[in-house]
Amino acid sequence: MMMKHRNKIAVMLLAGLSLVFASCEDDRNSNPTLQNPTKFVLNTPAYAEGAVYDLENSSSVELTCSQPDYGFTAATVYSVQVSLDNDFTTEGKFATLATTYTTAKMAIDAAEIAVAQTTLALEKGITEDRFPLTSKLYVRLKAALTNGKGEIFSNVATLRTRTKFALSPIVLPKTMNIVGSTIGNWKWEDCMEMVPTWAKNGTFWRILYFEKDAEMKFNIEKGWDGQEFGGSATLEDHANAGLSNAGGNLKVAQAGWYLVVVKTAVEGRNLKYTVAFEKPKVYLIGGVAHEGKWEILDENLFTVPADAKGDFVSPPFSQTAEVRMCVKIADEDWWHSEFIVFADGKIAYRGSGDDQERYAQPAGKRAYLNFMTGKGRYE
């Protein structure tokens, strides 16, 4: 009886080992080894010979390809690259379209191709007046697994495509923001908005106090999107601030109050910026000003405080009248950069808006303004 029991145990152990080996074999079969594909074919598009793809009047261009052989069925991501010069190695000579595909049959958005063709044409020095543009467009595909491994490029196919100028017009910005040590940190959520002039011409201003060696950057958007600028702008130092480019930041060597003016110009497809530091001249104007004149006069200048905590102080109001104040931006009327103090004590900038609500004050009072806190008062 004992021998039979031992034999039964041995048979059970052998059966268990067989299951283990079979399971290991199954695991190897379910986890095949990745092989790098050596061939990846972009098929010749249907109308590649002689015909012109009119991107303006088409919704898509169909491309098909073979699937790269990774040694097993794998989820593959396809990207489309285009070039006007059949150069897929030199920066600026080719473009990779943003949309990707997961099947070997792809309907490529014609508008996306048109934007890429237009951008590449501009890089070649082709100007907007030469559009609609008909040219050869070289196309290839990039394939890779979803984890980025197994990257391979297809052969190149040649199309003839026609496109109108497909890029949106470059427009002057409506907003400008400043971030950096002058506001205490480099967080865009805490940035300070600059004030647009009424002319809506891409000019912005702000009176600010800078500590010694303060650094800053500017941007249309409130974020790090690659469009921010600082010392790379054209710098105009009209107030002996000691401006310099500090690793891309705009650096101010001399502490003090300054009128900061940012001007924007469109050059080709780019926005070019000029940052000027001016003396912080603030003026009364109109009824409360010297002799009630509507002119920029030295008699109407505010005194400038010694530090960031101090107030700009106006001369006494010449008569009881509505209070109006301004800074003067070169080549613009004074009212393009005017402001008042609201009843709640906030400095309210006209910016690009309409005429502001008015507040009359008695003769003899003065205006007190702190441009860092944004508060003011009449006393």
Image (cartoon, grey):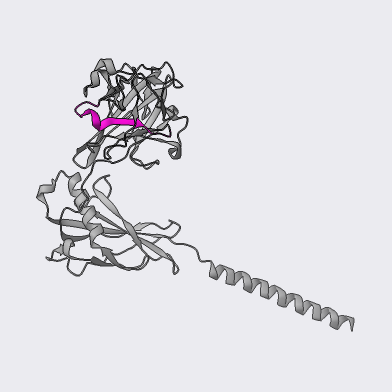
Q: Looking at the image, which residue is at 36% across and 58% down?
A: 152
Where is residue 237, by image quadrant? top left
Q: Looking at the image, which residue is at 70% across and 73% down?
A: 17
Examine the structure image and report whether residue 134 is included in the region drawn in magenta: no
Of residue 100 and residue 354, the one placed in the foreground of this image is: 354
x, y (%) of residue 234? 26, 27
Q: Looking at the image, which residue is at 84% across and 78% down?
A: 6
Of residue 291 and residue 10, the one placed in the foreground of this image is: 291
- Placement of 344 over or under 259, stated as above or below: below
Of residue 257 and residue 1, the one placed in the foreground of this image is: 257
x, y (%) of residue 173? 27, 41
Quadrant containing the N terminus in the rendered view? bottom right
The range drawn in magenta is 329-344
Q: Is 233 on the left or on the right of 310, as rendered?
A: left
* Residue lying furthest right: 1
Residue 83 seen: no
